Amino acid sequence: MVDKNNVVSKFKFRFPPPPPKVDADGDLIVSRKKSKEKTGVIEIEHSKSTVLGLVGLQIWRGALLLADWLLHNSATFKDKHYILELGSGVGLSSIVAGIFTPVFCTDINKGGLLKLIKGNVLRNVHLTKHPITVLELDFMSQVLPREIVTSIEKTPIVIAADVVYDDVITEAFVKTVGHILSKPPRRSVYVALEKRFVFTIADCDAVAPCYEHFIKCLEKLENIHKEEVPLDFPQYFHYDRVKELVLWKITSNFDEINNIP
């Protein structure tokens, strides 16, 4: 345990079924036996409760949605490419990605967060088949770690979950996204989050101000294409996939493509 006041939770999941096999003629091989479903368990040390500035010490549903997306698209990931996670929190999504491809796992070095991530990576090293490099990246500084700069051409996918909860941090996050997408070749950033609704007297309605501010910030980015990803892919982790969960895909407009799913 990194902190004796933390807890360790187990997150059970199932792996996607293997792709269907074909014979020499390209015909589907029908298996007579039903293959046994492959499952796994990720153990995560995290805080039971935190102040707003240390929300990364907890697990939120957006990270589980992002983990589902990673599992669903795992067959498209390549060993020689990296996935970069921004605002990794306790490292759940990065650990899932590390099962299939090398990962840069980043967050601020505050409240012992990077130490906690490294501990969680070690706790699940029996699952991950690829290196997970834990680095400090502060949205406020707009400076990318040297390791990421030198590997950015081999990083077609960037992921982030539950980073939209404070307008100042959201603005800095979107600027960081814009900075990363300004570098060729083409890459995509996937952002998973849960809309947080509040009732305001001014609107006489329930609104999601932090989410709306995030969308406004996205609209200011140039030379990108953004779209909301349908959540029709399977659920591999056990959690409540509420209707407030959303997944955005933001892609740079370079001609050169690097196999983005």
Image: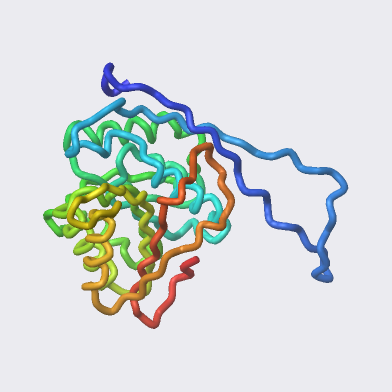
Residue closest to the eye, 32 or 54? 54
Residue that appears at 40% across and 57% down: 82
Q: Is residue 109 above or below residue 249?
A: above
Let me know if residue 29 appears in the view: yes
The image position of residue 180, as x and y in percent, is: 26, 65
Q: Is residue 232 left or right of residue 36?
A: left
Residue that appears at 40% across and 42% down: 61
Q: Is residue 220 left or right of residue 84?
A: left
Q: Is residue 37 above or below residue 253?
A: above
Q: Quadrant of the N terminus?
A: top left
Residue closest to the eye, 55 or 156? 55
The image position of residue 127, as x and y in percent, is: 51, 37
Q: Is residue 132 above or below residue 158?
A: above
The image position of residue 106, as x and y in percent, is: 27, 47
Q: Is residue 192 left or right of residue 170?
A: right
Q: Is residue 177 left or right of residue 33?
A: left
Let me know if residue 154 appears in the view: no
The image position of residue 226, as x and y in percent, is: 36, 71
Residue that appears at 60% across and 40% down: 14
Q: Residue furthest left?
A: 141
Residue closest to the eye, 249 or 246? 246
Q: Is residue 8 above or below residue 189?
A: above
Residue closest to the eye, 165 or 76? 165
Instruction: Tell me the quarter of the picture where residue 151 sits.
Output: bottom left
